[in-house]
């Protein structure tokens, strides 16, 4: 979906004034002339290439609110990727997201501007590891977080995201489920689905694992009455200290619907910036942690990706069908 930020009147004489107005709270006017040429070129190249840009909620405002066509969390991007009417998809996110887009659009060209945009969760488990788990726990269904490689997805029964993990686990009607690789997400889902025994893997997100309950207590002491919203990739004791926990899309919905006066988003830093652009009346308090992989995306390398059609993401045909089936089973859960 495309979110429209609250716009302020730009200073006279700036290039692309309507677009600058979307990010004026986060991009100083003095910096805008350096960004505008890339934005203008990207908008032109999208038309020439029949391309769309999918951007994760963790992208910086100068990408999220200026050149992205579809924005959202991993689940939203996966769902929207199925319906993309374009020849070229540029994924402003991390590599597993581009792989997922390719799985769902095998005939389209899928690009990622920086091949180094990885993920600690995706790196924490291999296809061989999954085969070992299946041998150790025969008959136990394997739910794999979408933050994994296509090779790992291919060894799984179905995927999930932080936004639909509870629904996916319940959809299996099984007494035991293997939920990999995010240990904290699995533990937080276990708290919501006590009737199912959830077996875990010791993978963690390098952004969310660093938050502690003390961080939240410190913020509450400094800002009495603040609303704390945590991502379910955080440790369970952090989630327990929070007022609400949910995927990045759920976080956005909570803020826009509940409209707390002050809020802390216990997640990646750009989330607060992107929601603040749409809600200038809400005060966002940090702490937050930066994802170094998401921040590999820039207007410059998105422009180069469209100019040169690099870097193209491919999936081994030997595993693509099985990996695609695991993602499609996840997407089908919503209809149940």
Image (cartoon, rainbow, N blue to C red):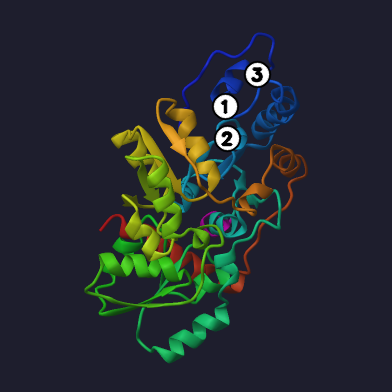
Residue appearing at x 26%, y 64% in the figure? 192
Is residue 30 depicted above or below 102 in this figure? above
Give the left or right position of residue 37, taking residue 27 as reference. Answer: right
Q: Which mark is residue 61?
A: 2
Range shown magenta: 102-106
Q: Which of marks 3 and 1 is nearer the N terminus?
A: 3
Picture quadrant where residue 107 is located: bottom right
Q: Which of marks 3 and 2 is nearer the N terminus?
A: 3
Give the left or right position of residue 28, taking residue 201 as reference. Answer: right
Q: Is mark 2 on a helix, strand or loop?
A: helix
- Image quadrant holding the N terminus, namely top left
Residue appearing at x 54%, y 42% in the figure? 270
Q: Mark 3 or mark 2: which is in front?
A: 2
Q: Answer whether labels 3 and 1 touch (C-beta < 8 Å).
A: no
Q: Give the residue furthest to the left.
A: 195
Q: What element carries label 1?
A: helix
Rendered location of residue 14, percent (x, y):
68, 15
Circle 1 sits on which residue? 23
Circle 3 sits on which residue? 16
Rendered location of residue 196, percent (x, y):
26, 75
Q: Answer whether labels 3 and 2 touch (C-beta < 8 Å).
A: no
User: Whole-Å distance between the Cαs marked 3 and 1?
Assistant: 12 Å
Is residue 245 depicted above or below 147 in this figure? above
């Amino acid at each position: 979906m495309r979110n429209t930020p609250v716009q302020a009147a730009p200073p006279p004489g700036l290039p692309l004034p309507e677009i600058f107005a979307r990010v004026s709270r986060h991009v100083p006017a003095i910096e805008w002339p350096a960004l505008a040429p890339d934005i203008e070129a990207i908008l032109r190249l999208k038309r020439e290439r029949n391309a769309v840009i999918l951007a994760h909620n963790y992208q910086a405002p100068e990408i999220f609110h200026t050149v992205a066509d579809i924005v959202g969390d991993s689940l939203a991007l996966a769902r929207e990727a199925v319906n993309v009417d374009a020849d070229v998809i540029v994924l402003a996110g991390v590599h597993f997201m581009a792989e997922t887009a390719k799985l769902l659009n095998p005939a389209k060209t899928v690009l990622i501007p920086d091949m180094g945009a990885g993920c600690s969760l995706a790196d924490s488990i291999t296809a061989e590891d999954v085969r070992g788990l299946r041998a150790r726990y025969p008959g136990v269904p394997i739910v794999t977080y979408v933050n994994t490689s296509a090779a790992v997805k291919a060894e799984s029964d179905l995927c999930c995201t932080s936004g639909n993990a509870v629904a996916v686990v319940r959809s299996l009607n099984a007494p035991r489920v293997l939920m990999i690789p995010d240990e904290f997400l699995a533990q937080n889902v276990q708290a919501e689905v006590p009737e199912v025994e959830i077996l875990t893997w010791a993978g963690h997100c390098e952004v969310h694992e660093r938050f502690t309950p003390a961080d939240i207590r410190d913020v509450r002491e400094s800002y009495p009455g603040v609303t704390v919203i945590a991502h379910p990739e955080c440790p369970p004791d952090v989630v327990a200290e929070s007022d609400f926990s949910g995927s990045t899309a759920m976080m956005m919905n909570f803020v826009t619907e509940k409209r707390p006066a002050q809020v802390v988003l216990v997640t990646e830093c750009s989330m607060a910036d992107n929601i603040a652009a749409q809600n200038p009346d809400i005060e966002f308090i940090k702490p937050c942690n930066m994802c170094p992989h998401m921040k590999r995306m820039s207007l410059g390398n998105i422009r180069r990706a469209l100019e040169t059609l690099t870097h193209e993401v491919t999936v081994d045909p030997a595993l693509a069908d099985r990996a695609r089936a695991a993602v499609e089973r996840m997407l089908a859960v919503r209809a149940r």
